[in-house]
Amino acid sequence: MSNIRFVPTSDIDSATLTSSDFLSTLPVTNLQTEGRSRVARTSNATGAKSILGDFAGATSCAAMVLYGHNISNAGIWRLRLYSGAGQTSASNHTNLLLYSGDLRNTAEAGSTRPWTQSDDTGNAVLVAQVAGAAPDAVSAASKLQANTVGLLKRSALQTFAVADNADVTVSVYAKAAEVGFLNLAVGTKDNTPLFPSVLFDLAASSVAATYASGAAIPAGAIEAVGGGWYRCSVSVNIRSGSSTPMVAFLLKGNASNADFTSTATGQGLLLWGAQAEVGVMTGYVATTSATVTEPLPVYDSGFSSPVGIAGWGTFAWGVEPWGSFMAADWEQAFWTSFFGPVLALSFRLDLADPSNAAGYIQAKRLLIGSVFEPAANAAYGASLAWGTNSQQARTLGGSLRTDRRSRFRVLRLTLPGLSAADRTRWLNLTRVAGVHGELFVSVFPGVGSEQERDYALLAKFTTPPETVYPGPAYWSSPINLQEV
């Protein structure tokens, strides 16, 4: 389990934020200001909403916190951090495939497309678009499916251009439907009779088998991205020769790589975000009629869900809708993401929640920046209580009346074993924050339960923390915090 973590607001508060997706009366800059009622709100929930940010200088980033948001459990976010200002970078990455999110052929799309389909007999395979089904929660996904009944080889294919002997990675987002096995094959330039390929078992989230072809030995990987989607990738040397490189996605029936036997038309699986690139797999780059080159982020979260689903023991059967999340009835819903530290000058945050019942996306605070995590965890004995500004008085008749006001959490704990390095960082954090600056505190980061929710809050120090020197080579610090 990770130790207690502190995320200061000073990094994001000194940044410059811009977005055309937020209301002028509730602008994106409200994400940098204090006050429970002061929020930033988009004009609608249609499509993806983007926030662009430039830090005041090179910033060590290891966390993102979205606090006081209204995003549903169907919402998606994607954070990209860049080494240069204005979402630029010292290097780029290119998707060599066209129409990466729409695998239909020319006849199906009604316009010229690079995707073709292969089968053992005519018209045995079909690609149809499924609206809003892609991992980004906005785009349509392509369903590669049987258009006839029986045992046939069904696939979608596209050629691409790349230099001889390049190390190439081909990837695609895949989700099982009636078919749970996907073979991802890459045709190399040396005209080998069989394409090197990898078989993926989507139900088991695993690489089921790897098939080399001559000297072309592929390496496969699969990564869960949520909502039943997986990003599957194959890396292989493209070799040299006169053949045109090609990528093929094939429906398979089992872990033995047998072709799928359909019992009805329409059976298949979902695909989206096809990408071919030189080198290792990077974040997805969307394309249509031409290849696209973008600055390569130093960090790319991919498409992730920003809420925690209520687990066993918390979900109230017959009371809450299935898929409710842990902070649904809290005044300050939040989401956190911690990652390895990278130096960044700018960022791009995309949010999508098209099914949001309110018809817009809203949040109180955004934090992106550094994290302080001491080597020694908080001491046992931490206390958490609900505080309130409510006032009570007895009437002449003896009844106790309460003037109800806001509630907030009060957290008291001690950092017991600060090393010399931790003491230096801690003193600097408390110097910058003082009693006026906000910071996000998570006592149990990564636990993923009500315990993490209860002990994570946007807070201020009620008194400046003292740093005590109880013995050689270590320091301690008692802390008093109140939720803002």
Image: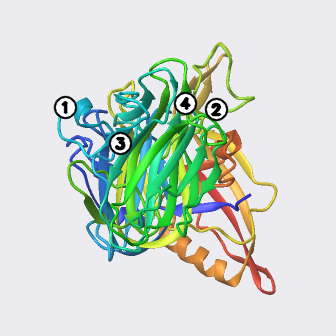
Residue occupied by mark 1: 110
Q: Which residue is located at x 28 percent, y 51 percent?
A: 98
Amino acid residing under circle 3: Val
SS assignment at label 2: loop
Residue occupied by mark 2: 310
Q: Is residue 240 visible?
A: yes
Residue 39 numbered tag: 3
Cβ–Cβ below 8 Å for labels 4 and 1?
A: no
Between the residue at mark 4 and the residue at mark 3, the CA separation in whole angstroms equals 18 Å
SS assignment at label 4: loop
Between the residue at mark 4 and the residue at mark 1, the CA separation in whole angstroms equals 44 Å
The quarter of the image holding the N terminus is: bottom right
Residue occupied by mark 4: 328
Q: Which of marks 2 and 4 is in front?
A: 2
SS assignment at label 3: loop
Q: Which of marks 4 and 3 is in front?
A: 4
Q: Which of marks 2 and 3 is in front?
A: 2
Query: Callout 1: few (<14), some (14-19), or many (20+) C-alpha neighbours within 10 Å?
Result: few
Cβ–Cβ below 8 Å for labels 2 and 3?
A: no
Cβ–Cβ below 8 Å for labels 2 and 4?
A: yes
Amino acid residing under circle 2: Ala
Residue 236 position (above or below residue 185) = below
Between the residue at mark 3 and the residue at mark 1, the CA separation in whole angstroms equals 44 Å
Image coords of residue 26 (percent x, y):
27, 42
Amino acid residing under circle 1: Gly
Circle nearer the N terminus (2, 3): 3
- Left or right relative to 456: residue 477: right
Between the residue at mark 1 and the residue at mark 2, the CA separation in whole angstroms equals 44 Å
Between the residue at mark 2 and the residue at mark 3, the CA separation in whole angstroms equals 25 Å
As drawn, which residue projects farthest toward the bottom? 472
